[in-house]
Image: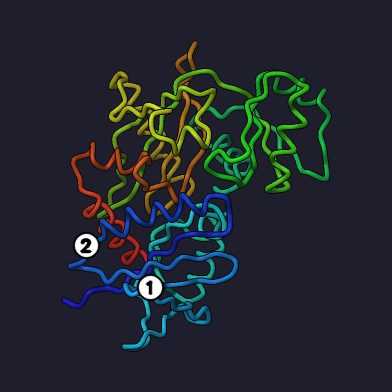
Amino acid sequence: MNKLNVALVAGGYSGEYAISVKTAVTIEKNLDSALYNVFKIIIDRNAWLYTDASGTNYEVNRKDFTLDLPHGCISFDVAFIAVHGTPGEDGKLQGYFDMLSLPYTSCNAIVAGLTFNKIFCNRVVAQSGIVNVAKSLHVLKDRPISAEKIQAELGLPVFVKPAEGGSSLATTKVKKWEDLPAALTSVWQIESQAMIEAYVKGREFSIGVYRTEGQLKALPLTEIISSKEFFDYEAKYTSGITNEVTPAVVTESVSTEIASKAKAIYDLLNCKGICRIDFILEEESNDIYFLEINTIPGQSDNSIVPQQVQAAGMTLSTFYTSLIREALKSS
């Protein structure tokens, strides 16, 4: 059997570049070398580069996404997208691959674009009635909203987040109104849209969902217990700050309900590949609130999905093979 050429694409144009590179290390290490020739391609705004074993760099030909190597031109059978943030999580890379008819292991361009914007995604999920969604306001840098309006609609505390950012970069929990301008300024430093979201107090959970062999599957549930104010960038990527319990210690009914809602959201949004969906179990009511969906979830040593794959009794190699096969089947 001929091995398939897999382009493992990582890096990107955002503050999540370093995390994406770590994700690619895990994926490359666990892709089955008996099935795939893996070419790790690191992209940034200056270049899209493949580096061979000798350390020689080769620029990707972006006209047809091929590599001219000394032993010949390499074209790809499938792309494994590991770019967090733009252009891998917002649909730009997917649109490019669509025009080249190259299969890839994630949501399509339209779905990626929708889910990448927290405000737009939350509106679609809220309208579905599948799950509760916290109230929020969409604030544009050049169209400010008065503190009075925010106070009247949301109260305190609130979370201020980039509408299209990931890894909790520039995310602030605001407990005093005088801290709101600084929180928005943090967002404006990286993008021009912010989401101000009402705070829901409760336990935070995360669950991976994917489709394989015609079946929609949910991985074991993880509870995220952070020693910090919330699950921010440091908590996500620094060992020891957060306790991630997989499988989560919850009643079977809560676990089943979250998995059911996660799969329903995955189908509602027409997702593909592995997505990680985050929820809050509200403290007083035990109501479940949708927090966000991540269509290119992290796969580094500190990431949640690899923990869940292991808890499900699978190897990452088997799991990644299933994602590639699904991408090829649905192309």
Q: In which quarter of the image is the N terminus?
A: bottom left
Image coordinates for residue 276, horizontal then vertical, percent: 41, 42
The residue depicted at 69 percent of the width and 41 percent of the height is 187
Query: Earlier along the polypeptide chain: callout 2 or callout 1?
Result: 2
Say which of 23 and 280 sits in front: 23
Q: Which residue is denoted by mark 2 in the rendering?
A: 32
Q: Which residue is denoted by mark 1 in the rendering?
A: 55
The secondary structure type at the circle numbered 2 is: loop
Judge whether 307 appears above or below 76 on screen: above
Q: What residue type is labelled 1?
A: Gly
Quarter of the image for residue 224 reads top left
Say which of 272 and 180 sits in front: 180
Q: How crowded is mark 1: few (under 14 residues within 10 Å), some or many (20 or more)?
A: few
Quarter of the image for residue 226 reads top left
Q: What residue type is labelled 2?
A: Asp
- Tell me if 28 is positioned left or right of 47 in this view: left
